[in-house]
């Protein structure tokens, strides 16, 4: 029998299976993203009670199976890991669910993801005591995209490399270039672009390097910045994020 392994982990998604089991997708600190089955999870108060739900931060104990992609989860314990009381507020649920889904979309099964785990843990910790806001959403998007190798540049023109001054006016975000181009270089491009106000470009650049605790409540990029990030993710991800529409409706309504 394979040895039992342990690692801190955050539950990304979960679903019931058969009469009493649960299948979960979990982002771990030490083993990347894992999919596992917890036998009797719906009935066992000692081993699993309320510890295999989305947002759960647990010490995961599991065994690898000789055949099959699912690991066999033996226990999940909260121990002294920080917990995220996301489910007490609808806005937090919306933003937290979006964070989980985007992380899931950007991580590969069992690929190295220690930093992604830390980014998600820090973001959920910043969200837990506060209301959901656009700045924290944008900061998370910038940080998790950078971890995945899609660092976006809002400070320099991706063609000439220059940092435009205030007199340059609007910049132009080009998804295929992974950043902005200046007004002087824009006529040389055939790709579509989103016109980006200088203040929105500056906000995204700032949020991409800010600690989440500082990003929360900060000034976000406007609708042009939101459109730029949405277009980039639509061109990059292999799926449409189901949580995005609900989150946008919550942020638009001030929820």
Image: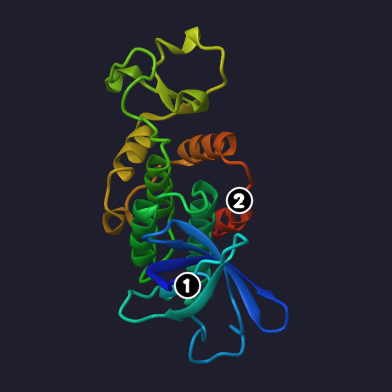
Q: Mark 1 points at which residue?
A: 62
Q: Name the residue under label 2.
A: 241
Find the residue positioned furthest to the top.
188
Answer whether residue 56 is visible to the viewer in this image.
no
Name the one closer to the observer, 196 or 5.
5
Instruction: Tell me which residue sits at (32%, 35%) in the image.
Output: 202
Find the residue positioned furthest to the front.
1
Q: Is residue 220 left or right of residue 164?
A: right
Instruction: Tell me which residue sits at (27%, 53%) in the image.
Output: 211
- Classify 10 Å Cα crowding around label 2: few (below 14), some (14-19), many (20 and above): some
Measure the C-alpha gap from mark 2 to mark 1: 29 Å
Q: Do the residues labelled 2 and 1 touch (CB within 8 Å)?
A: no
Q: Is residue 28 left or right of residue 13?
A: left
Which is more N-terminal, label 1 or label 2? 1
Instruction: Tell me which residue sits at (39%, 58%) in the image.
Output: 120
Name the one closer to the observer, 247 or 41.
41
Name the one closer to the observer, 216 or 13.
13
Please tell me whether residue 76 is drawn above or below residue 138 in the rendered image: below
Q: In this view, does 48 lie to the left or right of 163?
A: right
Residue 88: where, in percent of width, then height? 48, 77
Q: Is residue 232 left or right of residue 118?
A: right
Answer whether residue 89 is visible to the viewer in this image.
yes
Q: Quadrant of residue 209?
A: top left
Residue 31: where, in percent of width, then height? 41, 59
Q: Say what secondary structure mark 2 lies in.
A: loop
Name the one closer to the observer, 88 or 115.
115
Please tell me whether residue 242 is drawn above or below residue 202 in the rendered image: below
Please tell me whether residue 91 is drawn above or below residue 216 in the rendered image: below
Instruction: Tell me which residue sits at (34%, 82%) in the image.
Output: 79
Q: Say what secondary structure mark 1 lies in.
A: strand
- Classify 10 Å Cα crowding around label 1: few (below 14), some (14-19), many (20 and above): many
Residue 35: where, in percent of width, then height? 56, 63
């Amino acid at each position: 029998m394979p040895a039992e392994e342990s690692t801190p982990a955050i539950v990304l998604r979960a679903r019931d299976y058969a009469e009493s089991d649960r299948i979960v997708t979990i982002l771990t600190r030490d083993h990347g993203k894992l999919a596992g089955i917890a036998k009797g999870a719906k009935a066992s108060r000692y081993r699993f009670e309320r510890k295999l739900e989305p947002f759960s931060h647990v010490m995961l104990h599991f065994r690898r199976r000789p055949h099959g992609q699912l690991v066999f989860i033996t226990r999940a314990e909260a121990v002294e890991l920080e917990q995220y009381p996301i489910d007490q507020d609808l806005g937090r649920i919306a933003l937290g669910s979006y964070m989980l889904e985007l992380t899931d979309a950007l991580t590969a099964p069992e690929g190295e993801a220690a930093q992604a785990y830390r980014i998600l843990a820090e973001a959920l910790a910043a969200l837990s005591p506060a209301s959901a806001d656009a700045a924290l959403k944008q900061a998370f998007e910038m940080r998790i995209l950078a971890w995945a190798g899609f660092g976006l540049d809002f400070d320099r023109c991706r063609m000439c490399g220059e940092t435009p001054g205030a007199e340059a006016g609007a910049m132009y975000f080009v998804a295929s270039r992974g950043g902005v181009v200046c007004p002087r270089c824009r006529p040389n491009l055939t790709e579509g672009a989103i016109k980006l106000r200088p203040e929105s470009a500056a906000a995204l650049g700032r949020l991409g390097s800010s600690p989440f605790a500082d990003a929360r409540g900060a000034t976000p990029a406007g609708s042009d910045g939101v459109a730029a990030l949405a277009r980039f993710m639509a061109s990059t991800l292999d799926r449409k994020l189901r949580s995005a529409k609900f989150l946008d409706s919550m942020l638009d309504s001030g929820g």
